[in-house]
Each structure stands twice: as C-alpha cells, then as structure tokens.
Image: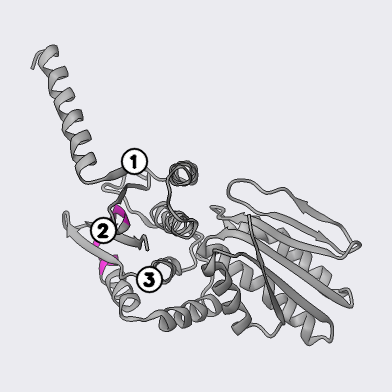
Amino acid sequence: MDKKSENQGFLDFAYQMYKSMKTNEINLVYEGEVTQEITKTFTSLTEKNLAKSEESNTVQRKVFNVMVECLQNISKHADSLSDEDEDRRGIVMVSHGEESYNIITGNVIKNEKVDDLKKNLEHVNSLDKKGLSDLYKQQMREGRISEKGGAGLGFIDIAKKTGSKLGFQFKELNEEVSFFILTSTIKRT
Amino acid sequence: MELINIKGTDDTPNVILDKDNAKFEISGRSLPEDVNMFYEPILEWIDSYAEAPCEKTEFNFKLEYFNTASSKVILDILLKFEEIVENGHEVLINWHYHEEEEDMLEAGEEYADIVEIPFEYIAYTD
C-alpha cells in the first residue's frame, strides 16, 4: 500500500469506529496496560463526565465503584499472551443506554484458572442480596489479603452493588490461555 | 503517643490518630494499589494504642468510597478495637455516610454485624 491509501485506510477505520461507538453508545474504550495510574485516570475521567450529566449521585457512585473493582481485577489478575510479556493488559469499555450502564472488561487468563473462576462467578450469581451480604462478611472474616493485594471480594461486591447478575464469557485462544469477558450492569433507575 | 496525621490523596484516605486530643478518624477515599503497605503503620499504631487506650474511644469513619481490599483492612482495624472493648474500655464507632449513599450505610451495618462494638450511623449531605 502506498502512503496515501494507507492514510485513507486509517481514516476510514477511525471513522467506522467512531460511528460504531456512537451507535452503541460507548462512552469509553481503552486497550492496554492497566495500572493503578490508569485506574485513577479512568475513574476520575468517568467521574467528571458523569458529574456533567444529569445522572443521579447514587448511580454515579455505583459506576465509579464497579470501575475501580474491574480495573483493579485486571491489574492484579490478568495474565499475558506470552511469557516474555509481563504487562497486565486488558480492554475496558463503558457504554450506556436508556436503562443502564454497562462496564465491560476483557483480559487474558491462563486456562488452568478458568474452571475456578467460572465456579466462583456462578456461585455469586446464584445468590440473592442477603446471600451476597453473608458471603461478603464471611470472606472478609476468613480471607486474607493475597500477595497481589486482592481480598477475593471483587465479584461479590459488584453483584451486591449493582443488584444485577454478572455477565461472563470465556473464549479459548490457544492451549495456554483464554480471553475472559466480564459485563457489569448498573441500572439507571 | 506519637501522632499519625496522613493527608488524603486520590486513592488514599485522610487518617488522624491523635490520642492526646482523642481524635480518631479515617475519611475520604481508600483504593490504594497496595493496601497492606498503606495500612501497616496504622494497624501498628492501634496495637500500641491498645496497650493503654483512652477510657472512651470515639472512632470516626467518614469514607466516600473504599475498594474491597480496603474493606478487609477496615475489618482488621475494627477487630483490634473489639479487643479493646473486651479489655473493658469503651469504644464507639461513628459511621458517617452520605445520605444518598445507601451502600455505605449497608457497609457499616455489615461491620456492626461482625464486631461487638456499638455503631452510630450519621448521615451527612454535600
């Protein structure tokens, strides 16, 4: 491809993406390394955008809470595609429709972790509000902060605060790793 | 006793632990990357405080937001105060929450379920 058509190709791609983001009401997309700095930048950006909107404070705080948990999950638990690459990367999307906000995150994880993770998520989804609160309390009492700085409470907290079931999918990429997608929904009413 | 006075940032809370003036407070936001590193000096301070606590301790939590890793450490702090209660001293937890923030009130109620310390819930507005 010569330089000119390459540029044109990129412009088309950028415009298509822009259009598709508008149609799907996606407010934010990020792909890359997820660190504490990125987490802080995102949450403050989201906070500013929400503050400008007419959104209720309760919903704003829930969106903020869920974003922090999702991003810190990636920065603590994401695996990488190859052994040479140590960055904890992921994709983060925030979209909103008339009824809800969706926070979608995706990251690579080792196949050996998939079963436990799935069981964990299914268990959280099987509980009602009271059950989630009990599990949260039990996990706080019995759990300890892991080496990675996690308390094993993230999914329970998201389910509790959103009052919605967690959406999750795994796509096997090769013999070693899968792609894990988590969708958290925050109702606007 | 030495005084702890940490000013809050975007991801760490304000912490005041001042025995001489009987002022004990954690406020703001708590979502540090490494909770253990941030809270270690605080837990150590409470351990030494427990050796000779005030007759009555009123501890104020006025958190706007805390992440799940912090929630575990907050329980550790409360458990230390529970021991102070067991040793015959009076402790009261003032749990402040924004009036629109029911999740924060619920979080306080969950702690009160776990530890044997009286909680007072105080709603505030902007």
> Is disc 2 placed on a helix, strand or loop?
strand
Q: Looking at the image, is mark 2 or mark 3 nearer the viewer?
A: 3
In the image, is residue B70 above or below residue A24? below
A112 inside magenta stretch = yes
Chain-order first, disc 1 or disc 3: 1
Chain-order first, disc 2 or disc 1: 1
Q: Residues within 10 Å of mark 2 (few under 14, many from 20)?
A: many
**How far is disc 1 from disc 3 in space, using C-alphas?**
29 Å
Residue hosting label 3: A163
> Is disc 3 placed on a helix, strand or loop?
loop
Q: Which residue is drawn at 26% across and 45% down?
A: A25
Do the residues bearing badges 2 and 3 touch, measured as CB atoms within 8 Å?
A: no
Residue A86, by quadrant, is top left
In the image: residue A96, left or right of residue B55: left
Which is more toward the observer, A158 or A72? A158
Q: Main secondary structure of the magenta part?
A: strand
Marks 2 & 1 on one chain: yes
Kind of residue at badge 2:
Phe
To which chain does the residue with label 3 belong? A
Point out the stretch of residues depicted in magenta.
Answer: A101-114
To which chain does the residue with label 2 belong? A
Quadrant in which the C terminus of chain B appears: bottom right
Which is more toward the observer, A180 or A126? A126
Residue B30: x %, y % from top left:
59, 56
Marks 1 & 3 on one chain: yes
In the image, is residue B58 above or below residue A173? below
Chain-order first, disc 2 or disc 3: 3
The mark found on residue A32 in the picture is 1
Residue hosting label 2: A180
> Is disc 1 placed on a helix, strand or loop?
strand
